């Protein structure tokens, strides 16, 4: 079973009179322990996909499931503790704020 499943994600943005397509029917499955690299030119939807997967942005349509959590159905408000949050294995995430010695 996949740890992260995204199916047919679509996301558009309005910029003046222009509609910008951020995600156009994007699907991806990521297994626990997999290493994934997203690459593409500027404006290709990398950050939009990551924001949607992390619950920071809601897709216009499609499904996002992280573990047992349907991220696309969370709505606004505080996010629940996501599976694997904190870097896994009980370790803090490498980018988490840490106290600075001597301060």
Image: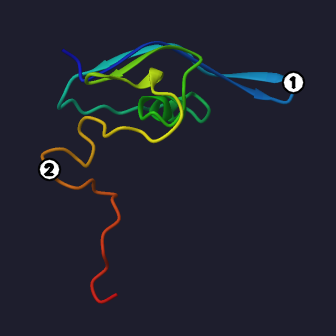
Q: Which mark is residue 90?
A: 2
Asked if residue 69 is positioned above or below residue 79 in the image, the reply reads above
Tag 1 secondary structure: loop
Q: Residue 11 sits in which quadrant?
A: top right
Q: Residue 22 vs residue 20: left or right?
A: left
Query: Residue 84's spot in the image, x, y percent?
Result: 23, 39
- Most extreme residue toward the bottom is 102
- At a point 31% along the width and 79% down the height, the residue shown is 100
- At a point 42% along the width and 29% down the height, the residue shown is 53
Tag 2 secondary structure: loop
- Most extreme residue toward the front is 77
Q: Residue 102 sits in which quadrant?
A: bottom left
Looking at the rendered structure, the number of numbered marks drawn on it comes to 2
- Most extreme residue toward the left is 89
**Is label 2 or label 1 in front?**
2
Q: Which mark is residue 101?
A: none
Query: Residue 87's spot in the image, x, y percent?
Result: 23, 47
- At a point 57% along the width and 28% down the height, the residue shown is 44
Asked if residue 60 is positioned above or below residue 49 in the image, the reply reads above
Q: Residue 94 sits in which quadrant?
A: bottom left
Crowdedness of circle 2 by 10 Å Cα count: few (<14), some, many (20+)? few
Residue located beneath label 1 in the image: 17
Query: Residue 42's spot in the image, x, y percent?
Result: 59, 36
Labels 2 and 1: the sequence-earlier one: 1
Query: Residue 92's spot in the image, x, y percent?
Result: 23, 56
Crowdedness of circle 1 by 10 Å Cα count: few (<14), some, many (20+)? few
Closer to the camera, 91 or 77? 77
Closer to the camera, 61 or 36? 61
Closer to the camera, 100 or 46? 100
């Amino acid at each position: 079973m996949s740890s992260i499943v995204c199916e047919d994600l679509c996301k558009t943005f309005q910029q003046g009179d222009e509609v910008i397509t951020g995600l156009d029917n994007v699907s991806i499955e990521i297994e626990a322990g997999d290493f994934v690299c997203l690459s593409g030119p500027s404006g290709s939807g990398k950050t939009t996909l990551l924001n949607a997967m992390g619950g920071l942005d809601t897709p216009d349509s499609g499904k996002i499931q992280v573990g047992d959590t349907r991220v696309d159905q969370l709505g606004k408000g505080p996010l629940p503790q996501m599976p694997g949050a904190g870097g896994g294995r009980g370790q803090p995430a490498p980018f988490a704020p840490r106290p600075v010695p001597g301060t």
